[in-house]
Amino acid sequence: MQALRAALIAIPLLVVAATVGAFLIFGLSSNRDGVSPRIATETTVVRDVDGNRLILTLDDAQVGDFEITLMFESDDGSYHATLVQPSASMTMMGHNMGATLVPMFRRSDGTWSGTGSFPMRGRWRFQIVFDGEAVELEHTAR
């Protein structure tokens, strides 16, 4: 009877140990192809526009997707309220693909953001036009 009890306890423990061992030995994890996880890249450009600072940030944390954020900061550090909507477009450098518009939405006073996706890897140029001023940002999509 004790041998049966010991076997009933030992068998599930062996199954769990074998499963954990298989995960450790064979690398059965979320990264099955052996490629290192993608590191997010962020590109920031700061420009003076009409006595205020325009802070342009491009973040491509997700594969193929990006978020672009514009912040208008005054000299005292507060965000300058603006109702003039900036326009953003992107084009691939070295290719004659034309420009793709990136819709921008107001998040709060002085902050606008837009999202989009890169159709392919490579070097991209973003152009932001605000109140007659154009700011360009170059970014490499991986």
Image (cartoon, helix red, strand yellow):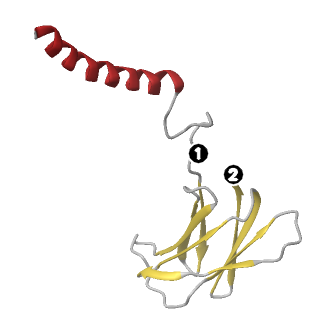
Amino acid marked by disc 2: Arg
Residue 74 % position (x, y): 46, 75
Instruction: Tell me the element at label 2.
Output: loop
Q: How many marks?
A: 2
Q: Residue at x 51, y 82 (%)?
A: 105
Q: Secondary structure at mark 1?
A: loop
Report the side of 75 relative to 7 (left or right): right
Labels 1 and 2 touching (C-beta < 8 A): yes
Which is nearer the N-term, disc 1 or disc 2? 1
In the picture, measured across the screen, residue 58 lies left or right of residue 14, that is right
Estimate the x, y position of residue 22 in percent, counting from the top left: 46, 24
The quarter of the picture where the N terminus appears is: top left
Q: Which mark is residue 126?
A: none
Query: Residue 131, position in %: x, y?
Result: 63, 88
The answer to whether residue 56 is visible is no
User: Can you see residue 47?
Assistant: yes
The answer to whether residue 63 is above or below residue 80 is above
Write down the residue under mark 2: 142
Q: Mark 1 = which residue?
A: 38
Residue type indicated by callout 1 = Arg
* Quarter residue 2 falls in: top left
